[in-house]
Image: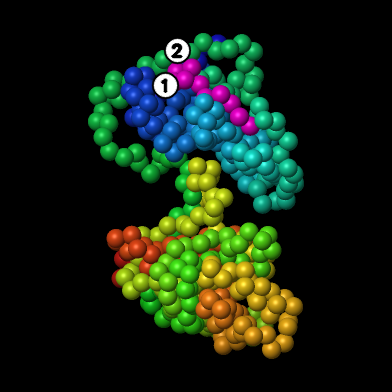
Amino acid sequence: MVVEVEYARAWDLEARAPWRPMSVGEARERDAAGLPYVVVYREPGREAPLEVRLVSWRDHYVGLWVYDAQGRRTYDLDMRLLDDPSRLMRRYTVGWNYTGPQMPEFDEKCPRVTEDLFPDRRGRRTEEPQGRGRGSYVTSSTLRDDERWMDRPAFGEWPLLSSRMHRLVEPPAFEPAEIPVAAEAAEVAGEAPGTCWRPPRPAQPGPINELFRPGVRVTDGYHPEMTVVEPRRVGTLSVPSGLLAVSGPDIDDGDGPHITVPVPPGTYVLDEARVRYSYHCEWRDEEVTTTAPTAVRLLVGESPAATWEMALGPDDDPRLFIEDQVAGFATDGATGCFADAGAWQQLAALFERGLVRGEPDLDGYEDLDDGSMFMQRTWDTASGGELMAFATTGDGTYPVWVGRSGTGEVVAVVVLVEGMPELLPERDGATVDA
């Protein structure tokens, strides 16, 4: 069987076609430089590709998309280049089992299986026999080491990794595809359009500054319109050690806080972002207006944040992040906190004694009930360090966003307690500058 091999700058997801085809020599140069490019494998006479390989060594990433005869993606393979440059790790896979030729690509009812794998042999397999969101069966992955890792082929020596899926009996013979004349003469400068593939990236911060700007209109997807109101100052936090902890105060693994952020030693203002919105109250059978918190912020500096970045814990490896993945602190008690990391053990112990054990008249613990989302405060008399706990909307992992000034100093640390709402246009039709 003959398989044609075509190289291109990118793969257009909307057109399902290569963007800016290029020669083997140019692809080899991009490969050596670590720049993104794609390789398309086709069987002559078949409209849909057999597979598309997506490469970006600078992002430690190689992906593989397998297509069926109807042009639907049936399998995604996400591989990562880690510490050993000669091997690739199978990081994440998704397989779709379409029930018939008429079922649309990525149909919600399509049965699918995912594998979420890590270098330390951990892994989770999720089977969804009725499709996404219709019940799942989760087990530990049973893949062997030789199935989790593969040798990294040299440029031009990659096999057709989907041969078995396409039921090919013999190894294919590869031939270079002809580059269209128009593509050869095309200007190659400029960025690929937004419809083209790009390497996976972790969750992005969104317009955090706007959550603290009164008058901005947002929606959380459930309430069609919400208006940001003046942030509420809820107190101060003393961080004499110069290391801020952001974590779930209820963790019991003994390893300390999940996230730490260096800040100048001092006492900082804590405030909460709030939105006001109206909704129909069923039990009162009338329209009511309420105010709810959306985020908590520790103000470290006076300058507004020019950039935001997701804080990482000691075990977080950005090379392993899949699309929109978050890192942050975990909680199984719907609670987060800001605290002085230098006195973490003492402050967390006071939190447990006050909230969990309910010790009366406990010195160093205060239960707050002033309409704020902050619920408990503890303090360490010896060091002067403090902890302020706040409610989240549930259990899970909450990212910590660090805002920096134009010169790189930390000016704010924010936790979103309900996810990032979407900005709505201003009244004159313009959109808010995020």
Q: Position of residue 433 (x, y in %)?
A: 32, 64
Q: Position of residue 50 (x, y in %)?
A: 53, 24
Q: Does the image show residue 280? A: no
Q: Residue at point 66% right, 35% down?
A: 97
Whether residue 2 appears in magenta in the rendering, the answer is no
Check disc 2: other Cα within 10 Å, few if <14, some if 14-19, many if 20+. Answer: few
**Is tag 2's residue or tag 1's residue first in the polypeptide sequence?**
1
**Can you see residue 66?**
yes
Q: Residue at x 41, y 36 (%)?
A: 58
Q: The disc labelled 1 sits on which kind of residue?
A: Glu
The span picked out in magenta is: 148-157
Q: Which residue: 51% across, 62% down?
A: 260
Q: Which residue is mark 2?
A: 175
Which residue occupies the foreground of this view, 246 or 363?
A: 363
Callout 1: SS: strand
User: What label does residue 6 carry, if any?
Assistant: 1
Please tell me whether mark 2 sits on a helix, a strand or a loop: strand
